[in-house]
Amino acid sequence: MLKWKKKNYKFTDIEHSVKGLISFILGIVSMIAFLVVSYLSSLSGGNGGFGYGVTGIILFIVAIGGLILGVQSFKEKDIYYNAPIAGVVMNGFFVCVYFILYIMGFSL
């Protein structure tokens, strides 16, 4: 019995943006790490110490990097925009959250 090889046809030249996917992945990492650090900080009664603060600043920088990559991916031609939009929204949200937490840390 002969097996026929299935041919894959591609009708468009649209591809996934690498920068958009990295932006989306950084947004997921930022979200998961924020939840973990928030949970660990709540276990210690809000007195997490220096390590949690440094982790928050690193996550703030990661979110800014994801936001920049997501915005840069919008300039590419013929891409799917699902991952860049999700990455920009998630990273933009977490940049705001980390910035507010950073400012609140000065006032307390």
Image (cartoon, rainbow, N blue to C red):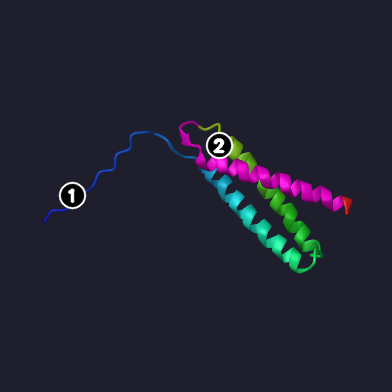
User: Which disc, if any, is residue 4?
Assistant: 1
Locate the N terminus and report the quarter of the image it occupies.
Answer: bottom left
Residue holding disc 2: 73
Relative image position of residue 78 (x, y in whole percent):
46, 32
> At 78% from the left edge and 51% from the top edge, which residue is drawn?
101
Badge 1 crowding class, 10 Å Cα cut-off, few under 14, some 14 to 19, many 20 or more, is few
Callout 2 amino acid: Ser
- 91 vs 56, left or right, is left
Locate the C terminus and report the quarter of the image it occupies.
Answer: bottom right
The span shown in magenta is 77-106
Relative image position of residue 79 (x, y in whole percent):
47, 35
Work out which residue is located at the far bottom of the displayed protein and give it.
Answer: 44
- 30 vs 104, left or right, is left
Relative image position of residue 107 (x, y in whole percent):
88, 50
Between 36 and 16, the one lying in front of the other is 36
How far apart marks 1 and 2 lie (CA) works out to: 39 Å
Magenta span includes 85: yes
Q: Quadrant of residue 49?
A: bottom right
Q: Quadrant of residue 47?
A: bottom right
Badge 2 crowding class, 10 Å Cα cut-off, few under 14, some 14 to 19, many 20 or more, is many
> At 52% from the left edge and 33% from the top edge, which residue is drawn?
76
